[in-house]
Image: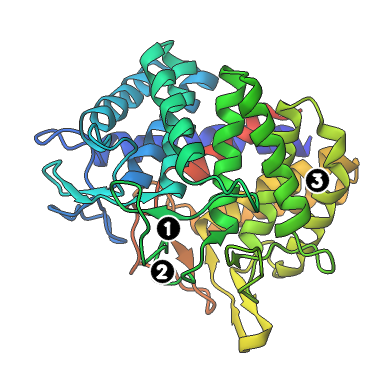
């Protein structure tokens, strides 16, 4: 009954609260595509830059929602995102996609961040599934080949972080100001893994299969800490760890994305034990109210007790996945508790969508975006769809 109740709640949240917010508020009816930002008080920030991550995640979210629910309006929104992306985000001269655009569609930051290329692979592969539009798959394959040609480290394994517009070396490799400026990161590898899994499902190429298997191996041998089962976050080119941070959200997200990748290869049993260890490590960040704290760094004496929207969404899926792997109903209860926390605290039933976070003192964070460069309909839409899909 617990899973049945979760399914009903997830469908209602997706259909009545999350997706309608994006359909109503984000399309730029005059300039095309989608606005770049809505602040935490639900005001559109006109002229805000348009991020590649945001647009790719909008495309993925509505494509995936259409695949599950078959409402034509979702495919219409996905097509709007697809058409804008192919018109403006693709670099027709050097290949790949831009990091960001001006609000009028002109290129703004033209660097080739591999994290971003991965999300476009993920989104274009899923849009192909939803629409049958072959050019979308061709674009995804094109991006995959560029990533392999420029980013894959053929000597040490894994993928390098970022490049200039012309795929040359770049000094600042970071995704954001909070990140370490290192050659390799867990976060990029996690989303290349996710993207390659989606692409492999629609294009079962043998080389892609080998690279996806190699990515799983990178997590097993390089990224997951053998002593703690937490993920290490930053590395130099030689895979020396350059971080002491524990990210509970990334831990729990990786615990189920690794299973998804192994399942796509027909090797799901190979990762089961490790996935449960990672989920158990992530559960160290649980608060008493069912939510998951953001991160800690014992070496720096830092513990961030904020409850970020995406961490809570990944907690639901990761704990649900751990229940399915183990049969232990305790995991299902944790997933249900996390969903209850979201619906009571993170979700905005008045204006729609989810708040960025609940602060450590229990107040709602209205200072960070409702929609923006990083605040997208991806984590929460995916959570709802994963709940609806699982048995």
Q: Quadrant of residue 197?
A: top right
On the rendered structure, is 391 left or right of 59?
right
Q: CA distance from mark 3 to mark 2?
A: 30 Å
- Tell me the tag on residue 322: 3
- Tell me the tag on residue 365: 2
On the rendered structure, is 192 left or right of 269?
left
Residue 30, given in percent of the width and then of the height, sits at 9, 34
On the rendered structure, is 256 left or right of 57?
right
* Mark 3: secondary structure: helix
Residue 45, given in percent of the width and then of the height, sits at 18, 55
Q: Are marks 2 and 1 in contact (CB under 8 Å)?
A: yes
Residue 230, given in percent of the width and then of the height, sits at 74, 64
- Residue occupying image coordinates x 69% and y 54%: 252
Q: Which residue is mark 1?
A: 355
* Mark 1: secondary structure: loop
Q: CA distance from mark 2 to mark 1?
A: 7 Å
249 is higher (above) or lower (below) than 361: above
Is residue 61 visible from the viewing direction of this image? Answer: no
Q: Are marks 1 and 3 in contact (CB under 8 Å)?
A: no
Q: CA distance from mark 1 to mark 3?
A: 26 Å
- Image quarter (top left, top right, bottom left or bottom right) of the C terminus: top right
């Amino acid at each position: 009954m617990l899973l049945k109740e979760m399914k009903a709640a997830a469908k209602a949240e997706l259909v009545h609260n999350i997706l309608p917010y994006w359909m109503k508020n984000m399309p730029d009816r005059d300039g095309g595509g989608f606005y770049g930002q809505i602040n935490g008080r639900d005001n559109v920030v006109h002229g805000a830059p348009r991020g590649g991550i945001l647009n790719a995640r909008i495309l993925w979210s509505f494509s995936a929602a259409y695949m599950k629910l078959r409402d034509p309006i979702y495919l219409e929104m996905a097509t709007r995102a697809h058409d804008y992306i192919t018109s403006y985000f693709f670099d027709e001269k050097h290949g790949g996609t831009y990091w960001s655009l001006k609000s009028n569609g002109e290129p703004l930051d033209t660097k080739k961040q591999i994290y971003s290329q991965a999300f476009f692979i993920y989104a274009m592969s899923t849009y192909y599934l939803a629409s049958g539009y072959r050019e979308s798959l061709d674009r995804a394959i094109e991006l995959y080949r560029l990533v392999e040609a420029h980013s894959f480290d053929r000597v040490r394994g894994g993928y390098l972080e970022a490049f200039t517009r012309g795929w040359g070396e770049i000094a600042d490799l970071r995704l954001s100001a909070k990140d370490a400026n290192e050659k390799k990161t867990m976060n990029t590898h996690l989303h290349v893994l996710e993207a390659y899994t989606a692409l492999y499902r629609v294009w079962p190429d043998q080389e892609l299969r080998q690279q996806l298997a190699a990515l799983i191996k990178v997590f097993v041998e390089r990224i997951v800490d053998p002593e703690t089962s937490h993920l290490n976050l930053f590395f130099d080119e030689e895979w020396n760890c350059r971080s002491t941070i524990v990210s509970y959200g990334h831990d729990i997200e990786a615990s189920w994305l690794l299973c998804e990748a192994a399942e796509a290869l027909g090797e799901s049993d190979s990762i089961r034990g490790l996935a449960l260890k990672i989920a158990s490590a992530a559960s160290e960040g649980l608060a008493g109210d069912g939510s998951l704290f953001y991160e800690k760094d014992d070496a720096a004496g830092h513990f961030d007790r904020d409850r970020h929207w995406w961490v809570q969404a990944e907690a639901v899926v990761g704990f649900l996945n751990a229940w399915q792997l183990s049969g232990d109903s305790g995991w299902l209860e944790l997933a249900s508790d996390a969903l209850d926390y979201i619906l009571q605290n993170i979700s905005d039933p008045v204006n729609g969508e989810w708040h960025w976070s609940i602060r450590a003192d229990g107040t709602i964070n209205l200072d960070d975006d409702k929609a923006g460069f990083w605040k997208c309909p991806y984590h929460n839409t995916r959570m709802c769809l994963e709940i609806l899909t699982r048995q």
